[in-house]
Image (cartoon, coloured by chain):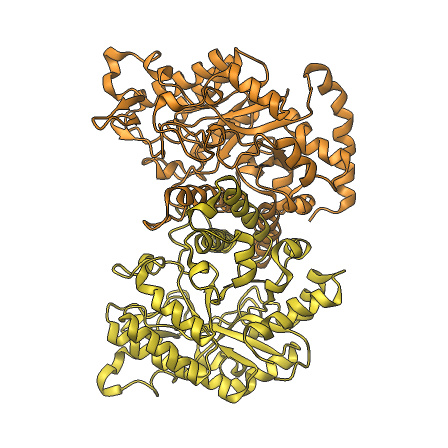
Chain colours: A yellow, B orange
Amino acid sequence: MEIKYGLISSDSHGQLDRNAYSSRMSQSKWGERIPHVIEVRDEKYTEPVERWIVNGEIQGGNVCNCPTAMSNRSYYPQRWEEVPLEVYLPTERAKALDRDRVDAEVLFPNGPGGTFFYNDAEFELACVRAYNDALAEFRQVSERFIPLAVIPFMSPIETIIGEVERAVKAGHLGINMLADPSVAVNGLKHLGDCFWEPLWAACQELGVGVHLHASAGLAGKLSLPRWQGFSTRQAHCVSTLRNFCTATQFVPYLIFSGMLERFPRLNWVFAETGLGWVSSVLEACDCEWEKRRLWKDGIITRPSDLFRRQIYVDFWFETVGIELRDCIGVDNILWESDFPHITSTYPHSWNAVEHSLAGVCDADREKMLYRNAARLYRLV
Amino acid sequence: MPTGKKCFIATRRDFTGWFSIRKKMELKHGLISADDHVQEHPDVWTSRMSHAKWGDRIPHLAHMDDGSEEWMIEGWRIPFSGVALAGAAMPERGQEPKRWSEVPRAVFSPAERLKTMDIDGIDYSVLYPSVSGVAGQNFGNAVDPDFEIACVQAYNDWLIEEWAGASPRFVPQCIVPIWPMDSTVAEINRAVKKGHKGVIYPASPMELRGVPHLNEPAYDPLWATCQDLGVPLCFHAGGSVKIQMSPGGAFKPAVAAAFGDVVRSVSSIAVVANFLLARVLDRFPRLKIVFAESSIGWGAYELEYADYQSAADGLPSMGYTLKPSELFQRQCYFTCWYDRMSFRARRHLGIGNILWSSHFPLASSTWPDTRRHLESALADVPEEEKRQIQWENAAKLYRL
């Protein structure tokens, strides 16, 4: 693809149209269980609002999480007609990219779409297929969209791999993963379980990376008990802030579990977790590896070398991690806009870029802003 | 974020105070280790607690039927991989001693510890426990408050008698009964009077037993007492088991231990996130908090993120008078030991907020190469900042 602006967002959120599931799932088989938008009453609003409903369960939050696409950035749309086309219609979304002078964006889910845990593997698979097909259409419209597939966690591993292969053929360039599926649903296997190994092998062969977004499903597990005294906004701040607690523990997990050694060409991509913590974590892992001589226990490669070979991290507001970029690996750093979520840099992403990258040489800038992403997703 | 200029002014002011500090304390090496661990020996509790009253519940080293030894508190086995935290002092580094007879004297004998400090070039050592929990959390599980107090007091008395009594180079810190606050405050007063210079409190007491959330005003007596006595309150990493990812079954023991240590340190990210917004720092502006066993890199990032996210969430309009990073720099400290390159982020954390530690005798301790480690890690750091990080910040905090 052509690089016009020199900026690729490695973490944005692609919203599916309200009919995305209804038009792809069997009405006769799934009926009202199909994810769709309905009108409901919400005590906070005098007028009826709209919400997504999946398997008969009304989804929390708003009908679309897209405050930065709204003219009033603190407003979340309550009815579908308020949702700007540039959030869910690929042709319009491409115009938003131009407005923000961004070449391409990686599409993580915008609810509902990350997981479909309703105690029914067949239903989950049907939803996953509909999601992957609908999101793949973004790439069919424009190669500026980089879709990531979701997987049917509750299916046998052969089915999961089959769906990944199908999705990749349709245009997906990576998969979404939970840091520990066994925390999300009772009965699913821990990420380190041999159950998942064929999936890692398949992704390695297909050349698609495994993506973990923010707390990657561990927010509840790795948080202190929540204090009821916090207001909604305070609680949001605390929980958002602590999200990188997952990545700081999961990177050491990948290293010390030997998974990176066993699948040396498989890439792991962390989205919305920032950069500044990475040097600490690598120094800690290297120190433990040296002091305990862990090469004798099967961790052959120095942890920081493993990281630089196979792990990617991204930034959007910070300066700390940029100053430490050579301790992290300037080839492992991506940029993200997080469009259209509340912390997004849209529509002034280049202002945020200049804030973070003041004084950084052109070669490093280009790598972090688009060359690394272009290489990772084989865009050029 | 602080500008370079701001940091310089703060440093100048600190520098003036240095001369008065210097008169009182003796510095041979110019290094204070702000987070080391003592190993409680098998007589700490058995010789100080009433056998008639507590019997087998007393914390002790139990000899198991299979010949192994385990630390037990009220029938609960302390989750050690051996009988002591001694990894750095063992002949085979990282291999924890399985029997008390294998435990190196440097971890439990003050006289031997002083020798290791001389070898490693360390003047003062700030002490945290081991059997009592690295974050002072292990007696917090006790359902019987009298038993909790008895265990806590035995530890605090022992540390004064055997360690502080042996040399002023040891900086003792007390552990406390986590609840009720009357008992907590009474023990702090008692311990500080005896010579303790810091208070260790587990950062998530509500996970230990059914006590209120740490952010509740019910804890105000704890903050007020520490503030009034001028002793820092220390949240050592590891106070919450829940927020540490478990390695699962597939890790070899040495790898699991390495993973556990790395994860324990970063788990404090969640503790810091909560505390920065909990309003305790605003309400007790002279209270000093130490987040022990942390790191400059992730700390600097967390502060920058906290400022960014709290603004995005509109918190400045909710009565927070200072940004999270400003609160931190006014009142909080990180102790670090893994750090090398991460020192480059030191100004984002605050030069005056960094305490060095050798973290002896944990396997990852810089022992016995602490001086060499610091020489290379601080090679590009100006002398004035080096001095702050290596001893001056700790000397002021602990009033040495």
Specify the quadrant of the image occupied by residue A111.
bottom left
Please name whichever residue, B316 or A244, is drawn nearer the observer in this view of the structure. A244
Position of residue A343 relative to residue B289, above or below, is below
Please name whichever residue, A192 or A227, is drawn nearer the observer in this view of the structure. A192
Q: Can residue B31 be seen from the camera position used here?
A: yes
Instruction: Specify the farthest residue to the front.
Output: A296
The reply, left or right, for residue A142 in relation to residue A162 is right
Residue drawn at x 68%, y 16% as measured from the top left: B26
At which x and y percent is residue A118? 27, 69
At which x and y percent is residue A294? 46, 45
At which x and y percent is residue A239? 47, 53
The quarter of the rendered structure image containing the C terminus of chain A is: bottom right
Please name whichever residue, A212 or B7, is drawn nearer the observer in this view of the structure. A212
Position of residue B127 relative to residue A285, above or below, is above
Q: Can residue B230 be seen from the camera position used here?
A: no
Specify the quadrant of the image occupied by residue B338.
top right
Residue drawn at x 67%, y 17% as measured from the top left: B25
